[in-house]
Structures are given as C-alpha cells and as structure tokens.
Image (cartoon, rainbow, N blue to C red):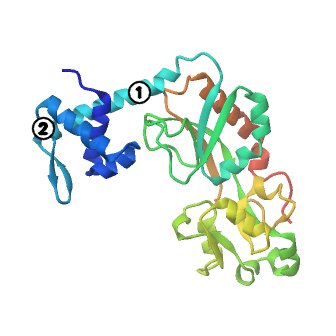
Amino acid sequence: MALNWDDMRIFLAVARHRSLSAAARHLKVTQPTVGRRLSQLEETLSARLFDRLPDGFVQTVAGAELLPIAETMEHAAETLERRQATLADQVSGTVRLSVFETPAQFLTDHLSELRQSLPEIEIEISMAHVNANLSKREADLVVRACLPESPELVARKLGKLSYAVYGAHEYVEANPSARGPQRYSDCTWVSFDDDHTYFAGQGWMREHLDGRKAAFRVNNGLILHEAVRKGAGLGVLPCFAGDTDPALVRLTPPLEGVESDMHIIVHPDLRQLPNVRAVMDEVIRLFKQEAPRLAGRPRLAA
C-alpha cells in the first residue's frame, strides 16, 4: 500500500485546523475535495482517523499514530522542494526577500544597482513584521535585526543601523524649541503604536518624553517617515533615510543605544543555490558599501 503525499497533506491540515472548511482554506482547495480525499485515505487505511464532534475533528487512536508519520513525510517533502532548486546551475529565476520597513526602504533605494548586478534574477521584496518561515520556503532570504531562533538557519551580519531625531524644515522653523532639549516637552511627536514599542528608538522616545505619549502613532515605519516629512511632528527615523530626505533636518547625533544590528538569514539547503547566493552576496555588499550612511555619519547634527 503506497501512501499519497497529497492525502497526507489533507490529513495534516484537518488535524491542525480541526475542520474541513479551515483545512480547505489553508490548502486553497474546496471543502468537498478535502472531505473526499480524507474519506479515500480512511478507506485505504481501513481506519477511522477522526471523530467528528460538534466542536471539531478530533484524532482517533489511528489518527494519532499516523500524525508523526505524516509530519515526517511533510519534512521530507519540504527538504526535497528546497534542494530541488539547488540542482540548478544558472544564476537566474526569482528570489524572495522578507524584510520589515527599514531594510525594505534601504533596498528600494538600490533597486537599479541590484538590477545592474543581477540582470537575470527577479527579486520579490515582501514587507512584514513577522518572520517568514524559511523551512517552508515562505521566503528565500530574511533580513532582520534579530538572530534566528532556529539553530538550523544560517545568519550573516550585515551591519549597524543608526537612528536620530528628525523634523520637517517647516516644522522646525515654526518650532525653534525643536533644536534643543525643550523639544521633548514642547513639540509634537510621531511614534509607533503600542503593538510596536519594540521597534528601534521607541523605548528611547518614551524615556525622553517622560511618560507623555506621542500625539500620532502608527504601525508602519514608512507611514511614520511620511508623517514626519509632512510636518506632523518630530520622530525617530533611520539615519540613512532621514539624511537623504531633503524635506527633513536632523536634530540629534545618532542616538546612543538605539542601533540595530542587521542580519541576513538563509536556510542551509538554499545557501548554495546560485541565485539565492548571488542576491545574498549582493545585499551583504550593499550594506558594507553604505556602512557610513547607515551609521549616520554623512553629516553633522543640526
């Protein structure tokens, strides 16, 4: 009796989501398809795998015994999918990067340079606050400030990002206290919302505002940058972005203790894939090339 991996995927989805409809949404198939394939699997095994209870599908003894076997098959399938690509010997195809706003902003500044260096590679940049699962190939590379939790993943340090306080020229001209220590009590501020207080600079801002909350709070770094440049108030921004924006003036040196150590993370099965390796090497080169600007050293504080 040969077990079909597609049937095992159905079984795993039902076991994890405990309903046919939720499993169907996860697998992007119809609910009748899930029900039919599950019934076929039970018929093939001559065993009932789930008890259909009012609050969802619960594994039977047979289902519980099958679960680790199905998970082993899933792991093998994921490994095969990753390693299948490493057989290619051409530096071409699509490479997907998962990043949050700050490195996304940096990378988009260099898209033309990336294209010149890697003309045969298509690059997809996915902006997210949650790490993509590299084992499941939700992305090929992840650029993050934190090291990976999984010991199987490989991380290379890219460099350090520095942050400073910025304001729009018009706002600073209209609010002279923005240039001195009175800025913390007299000026309007823009920050991340309470769900993103772990982002760089947010703890520093709370400390210096002495418990006073920012008047405007957002959940996206690009929106924060745009709000500051439009004169909504002062904000903590990455130096590489603030220093090159002609609408902004930097009001402090790089903030001490607010730096972020950036890393690029890859699954070892993909590390030697020619196109992934080429993009990884190019991103490392760009961060090294732009290290002074990323550290906020191009100009003195105002």
**Side of 302 where 11 appears, left or right:** left
Quadrant containing the N terminus in the rendered view: top left
**Side of 196 where 68 appears, left or right:** left
- Is residue 256 at least partly visible in the picture? no
Q: Residues within 10 Å of mark 2 (few under 14, many from 20)?
A: some
Which quadrant of the view contains residue 60?
A: top left
Amino acid type, mark 1: Thr
> Which of labels 1 and 2 is toward the front?
2
Residue underneath mark 2? 62
Residue underneath mark 1? 79
Between residues 296 and 102, which one lies in front from this camera angle?
Answer: 102
**Side of 121 where 268 appears, left or right:** left
Q: Are marks 1 and 2 in contact (CB under 8 Å)?
A: no
- Report the residue at 23% width, 31% height from top: 69
Q: Secondary structure at mark 2?
A: helix
- Report the residue at 74% width, 62% height from top: 164
Locate residue 212, reporting x and y percent. 61, 81
Amino acid type, mark 2: Ala
- Report the residue at 82% width, 69% height from top: 168
**Label 1 or label 2, whichever comes before in sequence order:** 2
Which quadrant of the view contains residue 8?
A: top left
Locate residue 285, reporting x and y percent. 72, 34
Residue 248, compared with residue 209, is above or below; it is above
Residue 63, compared with residue 82, is above or below; it is below
Residue 230, compared with residue 55, is above or below; it is below
- Report the residue at 74% width, 72% height from top: 234
Quadrant containing the C terminus in the rendered view: bottom right
Q: Residues within 10 Å of mark 1 (few under 14, many from 20)?
A: some
**Side of 68 where 231 appears, left or right:** right
Locate residue 129, reporting x and y percent. 54, 54
- Is residue 215 at least partly visible in the picture? yes
Q: Which mark is residue 128?
A: none
